[in-house]
């Protein structure tokens, strides 16, 4: 759940919103049959035209007069104007892609014993590797594939990485050695990381209203929760046949997904405009027709030094990002610890089979669905409050807009851990500890919704970097902490192991309350937030200056007429 950064853009270029040139130069239609192919003519200053310095216009556009292609009102090529059935197809395709990725993350949890027997593994800790190593791949997505999708388009990157995911899932199913299996899982995880980091951007590409975005992002977050829950169910029931069949199931799901992905259209506006410009150049033989993205220079040094290191700098030096990342990382790691803990609890205490253990994860999914409903109700209430005249003061404060969700989710998450730990015993019916997963799933998703949306609201144009820091840190925690699950539960017992996680979560649950109390002061001392405020002030002054110039021009014109 990413906003593009504005650093590195050429200030001499027209402002671009979703690929639409918004600067006011005149526009005209080339031909009557080119419906929607709105273009803008940009004439350079005389001094620039006569200068011997390199022109910002690419060499294939020799004419000093450039025609900037943009979307016209109602243009069917504009992803915002896609038909509702087309948008629904994109939403479903993306949801299935996310499910592929997340099912793959936990598919190995139900086949630990047959895998151990087949490869003769004596060290139980090694059995955590097929799950943990997969999550290392999730670190790659936000750092590499998300920026690539903004350079080459969403669809090419999704297809290329889904090829990787499919190929190495096949390799996992055929792995002759345990080392080979682990390597294949790592590479499959790298391919699977793209939907997690790119799909949020796809939804933002096609929906430009807050209500619609809120709905599809809720669906996206629910899919990221349900996918890992389906994995242990599927693998648990095929485990008696063969451990390889768990990966064959994952491969079958990927095969069913391929037709959807191939038919999905490109959604990233600037890339769609680039294709439109190429079509117009070929049709009219005019090499000066360009899309705004074709005029932007790629500075490799800035990309590496500034953009790619920004998530690291924000994690290290931004208090909001650091504490939010730690909270989300702990919650996320506990979620993946449960794939090791649930078999210990329900197989060891109640004698469940692998398939039955998988079913005990379902209440987590139900809780996440309830969380999605709460999010939509809160978002609707917030929209109504902000629409009032005058709007209540609290609706303009970032901390009050999103963090109440995390304030509700945190205590529910803590309660669920103590509930599970102290009711999982032979003398208590299995349904009681199983139902603890309801508040767990509810709290888990509310925490993520509240904290991630707060990062977006607080950092705006830097939100992609903040989200990247959050994604990488929680994936690393998800890799490391599950290795402690079996020793912790074996040494402390179920009750105190869950209590230890509960006390850690209780400590972390104070973070959103601290933000609500002191968030404005923290943001005032934040380097990135100060830069953001400075940019807003400069933009506001520029708008005021432009308005004053327009007013003076009208006054002068009126005086000349008189």
Image: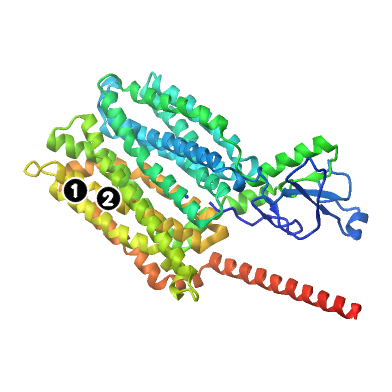
Judging from the image, what secondary structure is the residue with disc 1 in? helix
Residues 189 and 41: in front is 41
Count of picture labels: 2
Q: Quadrant of residue 344?
A: top left
Q: Which residue is mark 1?
A: 420
| Residue 323 locus on image (x, y percent) | 40, 60
Which label sits on residue 440?
2
Q: Secondary structure at mark 2?
A: helix
User: Which of these two is toward me, 231 or 488?
Assistant: 231
Q: Crowdedness of circle 1 by 10 Å Cα count: few (<14), some, many (20+)?
A: many
Q: Is residue 383 above or below residue 41?
A: below
Kindly tell me whether residue 15 is visible in this rendering: yes
Q: Are marks 1 and 2 in contact (CB under 8 Å)?
A: yes
Residue 131, image x, y percentages: 36, 35
> What residue do we see at 20% from left, 46% from top?
435
- Disc 2 crowd rating (10 Å Cα; few below 14, some 14-19, many 20+) is many
Q: Quadrant of residue 379?
A: bottom left
Q: Earlier in the sequence, mark 1 or mark 2?
A: 1
Q: Residue at x 17, y 34 (%)?
A: 347
Residue drawn 40% across the image and 67% down it: 515
Q: Residue furthest right?
A: 50
The percent position of residue 157, horizontal first and vertical second, equals 58, 36
Residue 293 vertical placement versus 248 (above, below): below
Using residue 141 as the reference point, say whether residue 277 is left or right of it. Answer: right
Work out whether residue 92 or residue 136 is closer to the camera in this orientation and state it: 92
């Amino acid at each position: 759940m990413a906003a593009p950064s504005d650093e590195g853009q050429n200030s001499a270029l027209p402002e671009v919103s979703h690929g639409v040139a918004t600067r006011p130069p005149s526009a005209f239609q080339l031909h009557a049959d080119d419906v929607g192919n709105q273009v803008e003519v940009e004439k350079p200053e005389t001094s620039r035209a006569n200068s011997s310095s390199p022109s910002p216009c690419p060499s294939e556009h020799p004419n000093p007069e450039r025609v900037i292609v943009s979307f016209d009102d109602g243009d069917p090529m504009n992803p915002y104007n896609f038909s509702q059935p087309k948008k629904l197809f994109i939403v479903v395709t993306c949801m299935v892609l996310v499910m592929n990725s997340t099912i793959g993350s936990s598919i190995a949890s139900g086949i630990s014993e047959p895998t151990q027997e087949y490869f003769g593994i004596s060290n139980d800790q090694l059995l955590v590797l097929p799950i943990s190593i997969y999550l290392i791949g999730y670190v790659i997505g936000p750092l590499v594939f998300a920026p690539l999708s903004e350079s080459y388009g969403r669809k090419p990157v999704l297809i290329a990485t889904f090829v990787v995911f499919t190929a190495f899932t096949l390799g996992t199913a055929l792995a002759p050695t345990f080392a080979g299996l682990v390597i294949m899982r790592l590479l499959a995880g790298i391919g699977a990381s793209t939907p997690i980091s790119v799909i949020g951007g796809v939804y933002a590409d096609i929906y430009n209203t807050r209500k619609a975005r809120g709905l599809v992002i809720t669906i996206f977050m629910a899919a990221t929760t349900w996918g890992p829950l389906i994995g242990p169910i599927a693998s648990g029931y095929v485990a008696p046949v063969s451990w390889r069949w768990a990966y064959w199931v994952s491969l079958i799901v990927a095969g069913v997904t391929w037709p959807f992905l191939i038919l999905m259209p490109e959604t990233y506006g600037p890339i769609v405009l680039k294709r439109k410009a190429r079509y117009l150049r070929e049709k009219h033989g005019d090499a000066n027709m360009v899309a705004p993205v074709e005029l932007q220079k790629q500075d490799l040094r800035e990309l590496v030094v500034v953009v790619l290191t920004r998530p690291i700098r924000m994690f290290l030096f931004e208090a909001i990002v650091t504490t939010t990342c730690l909270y989300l990382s702990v919650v996320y790691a506990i979620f993946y610890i449960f794939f090791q803990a649930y078999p210990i609890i329900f197989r060891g205490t109640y004698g469940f089979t692998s398939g039955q253990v998988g079913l005990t994860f379902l209440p987590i999914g139900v809780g996440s669905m309830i969380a999605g409903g709460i999010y939509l109700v809160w978002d609707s209430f917030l929209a109504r409050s902000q629409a009032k005249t005058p709007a209540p003061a609290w609706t303009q404060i970032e901390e009050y807009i999103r963090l109440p969700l995390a304030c509700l989710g945190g205590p529910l998450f803590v309660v669920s851990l103590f509930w599970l730990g102290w009711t999982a015993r032979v003398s208590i019916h299995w349904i009681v500890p199983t139902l603890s997963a309801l508040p767990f799933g509810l709290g888990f998703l509310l925490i993520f919704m509240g904290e991630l949306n707060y990062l977006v609201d607080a950092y705006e144009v830097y939100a992609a970097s903040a989200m990247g820091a959050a994604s990488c840190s929680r994936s690393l925690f998800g890799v490391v902490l599950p290795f402690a699950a079996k020793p912790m539960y074996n040494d402390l017992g179920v009750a105190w192991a869950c209590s230890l996680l509960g006390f850690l979560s209780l400590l972390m649950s104070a973070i959103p309350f601290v933000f609500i109390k002191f968030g404005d002061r923290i943001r005032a001392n934040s380097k990135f937030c100060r830069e953001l405020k400075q940019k807003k002030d400069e933009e506001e002054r520029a708008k005021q200056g432009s308005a004053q110039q327009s007013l003076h021009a009208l006054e002068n014109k009126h005086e000349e007429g008189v």
